[in-house]
Image (cartoon, rainbow, N blue to C red):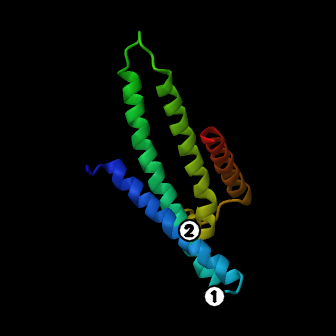
Amino acid sequence: FKVTPTGILDVLSKTGYFFYWLFDNLSILTKLKLINLDLDKQTKLAATFWFIGATLAILKLLIDLNKLLTAKQNQDPTKLDKSLDIKILNCYLNIISKVGDLFPSGQVSGIALKVLGRPFSETSVGFGGLVAAIIALKNSWDSA
């Protein structure tokens, strides 16, 4: 067992997504009036952990991309590995997907308002979510 920066970022990102899942489900149960919690607070907490999970995932993906690009640069020109190019493309797509996730999660959590002093436009939130969803569908299609 070896502790690496990418391993730590991966665990922290998945922990963020776990708490996103937890608070999102609590907000759904509250909306259905099965439990009595503050809906706005649960939704905001869910979006905050979504934002944290996506941000940490981006950091991990950037480290992965750096390793892949270094491997590509050190590759023997006479023996090109096409699978490396596919891994690099998928890494770029996953980064774009996570950046797309930052728009809706940053909007709902209020992070955009705190950091930028104004919320994201509804167009950017919708477009970010659309891009993330299309890439997620592409990844699901590829793994099927």
Find residue 21 and name its label. 2
Q: Which quarter of the picture shows residue 40?
A: bottom right
Q: Is residue 132 above or below residue 13?
A: above
Find residue 35 and name its label. 1
Secondary structure under the numbered disc 1 in the rendered image: loop
Please provide percent x and percent y for residue 142.
62, 38
Q: In the orientation shown, which residue stands out farthest toward the left? A: 2
Q: Is residue 137 left or right of residue 81?
A: right
Q: Alpha carbon of mark 1 to alpha carbon of mark 2: how far? A: 16 Å
Counting residues from the start of the chain, the first of labels 1 and 2 encountered is: 2
Classify 10 Å Cα crowding around label 2: few (below 14), some (14-19), many (20 and above): some
The residue shown at (63%, 47%) is: 136
Please provide percent x and percent y for residue 67.
37, 35
Q: Is residue 130 above or below residue 87?
A: below
Q: Are marks 1 and 2 in contact (CB under 8 Å)?
A: no
- Give the residue type that dot 1 points to: Ile
Residue 91 in sight from this viewpoint: yes
Q: Is residue 11 left or right of residue 137?
A: left
Q: In the orientation shown, which residue stands out farthest toward the top? A: 78
Q: In the orientation shown, which residue stands out farthest toward the bottom? A: 36
Q: Quadrant of the C terminus?
A: top right
Q: Is residue 75 above or below residue 9?
A: above
Please provide percent x and percent y for residue 56.
44, 55
The residue shown at (53%, 62%) is: 51
Please provide percent x and percent y for residue 96.
58, 44
